Amino acid sequence: MKEKTLIKNAKIVNEGAIFEGDLLIEGEFIKQLAKKIAPTEDVNIIDAKGSYLLPGMIDDQVHFREPGLTHKANIATESKAAVAGGITSFIEMPNTVPQATTQVLLEEKFAIASKTSYANYSFMFGGTNDNLEELLKTNSKTVAGIKLFLGSSTGNMLVDNEAVLEKIFSSTDMLIAVHCEDEQTIKKNTQIFKDKYGDDIPVKYHPIIRSEQACYLSSSKAVALAKKTGARLHIFHLSTEKETHLFRNDIPLEKKQITAEVCVHHLWFTDADYDEKKTYIKWNPAVKTLKDKEGLWKALLDDRIDVIATDHAPHTIQEKDNVYTKAPSGGPLVQHAVVAILEKVKEGVISIEKAVEKMSHNPAKIFKIDKRGFIKEGYYADLFLVDTNNPWKVSKENILYKCGWSPFEGTTFSSKITHTFVNGKLMYNQGEFNEKDKGERLIFNR
């Protein structure tokens, strides 16, 4: 018999509306939505009075570090933190060790996730200057997309051969997701500061080294190439106001060939925070000015930017506590991303309906994920309950990342996630985890 759960008296947020009512989960799926649903004897009941019920966030960009970098994180630890943070599905990047640049290596990552991931999962195939033949074997129904580093790559993943780049854009109908920073601009800027400071460059110069110009030069090239070839392009982690003007909001999302994402840290921090947070907010692309942050919010709200994601990229404290040139870029975010955005809801910056659109609905639409990202009858029950009047402070004691730190340490959030369902299973329940069930591989309607 299928397990049944009845969530009663919730404020259900879906497709731009808030509906107070009940939701019945049967097996993996949402069976019924109604103002009132009468319980039966075989149903588990959760009274959600006062709480919001939201579709689980689909995080389209994470680095869970497995295989090869598991001293920082692994799929089990980070997906557990994600589920506690209301993220029910993630798409992970190919720059692990070894890199997921062959179909065999890609499937090895899927095999790990099938045994250890608390959340639903997919992975990107990594393009290089010389693996086009292998890239074209990627199955568009079972793999999220193609990831290209047009800057800030690891190993041999920098795709800097323009002829190869055009060939990739012209040859695949899969979604191509890109990291855009111009490598030559960054190298030149780095050398200027190294000549002055050596390796111990003050971190406040990070956004000047990885400058607006470096970002715009690369992203504008990618957009031009997508327009020329007709490629389906998705640009990750915009960090500048200038870049937002490359994108449209005059057509529905479903008709866009070029889409964009912004990450939580670029919506939260500015260059004024480097003095306090130092390398703990050193990301690529860099956190930039207040003008940039405000421009990103404006573009998010007027639909030039389509998705909110995390770019969760943990490093150990020992790695981060280094001089500028040796401290790696990236930080952990999946446990705190949703509550950070809900804090902005509380402040009146964004509505909860719009937040759900950017965190859940739009990633599902952009990647064409089968039956996820919405609260609809017949869809997978990927859901979370959140009490928006339950303050708590981020501290070492409640951080779930394997790396054991967060750029949000010391921050008090107003909202607490109490329950998370993945495929209808209660995966997280007020601090306790379901250790017997696992997430599923995402399927794409392409």
Image: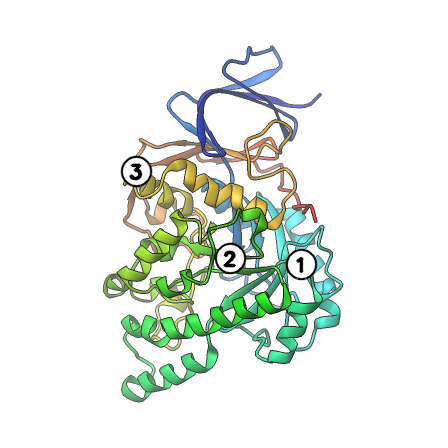
Relative to 389, residue 169 above or below = below
Mark 3 residue crowding within 10 angstroms, few (<14) / some (14–19) / many (20+): some
Q: Position of residue 308 (x, y in %)?
A: 45, 50
Q: Amino acid at mark 2?
A: Ala
Give the residue number, with chain letter if any, for mark 1. 174
Tell which circle, 2 or 1, labels the residue nearer the N-terminal end: 2
Residue 263 at x, y = what percent? 42, 55
Check contact, mark 3 vs mark 1: CB within 8 A. Answer: no
| 128 or 16, nearer to the observer | 16
| Badge nearest the viewer, 3 or 1 | 1
Residue at 30% from the left image edge and 78% from the top image edge:
201
Amino acid type indicated by mark 3: Lys
Residue drawn at 54 percent across, 65 percent down: 178
Residue extending farthest front: 250
Q: Which residue is mark 2?
A: 73
SS label for mark 3: helix
Q: Which residue is mark 3?
A: 346
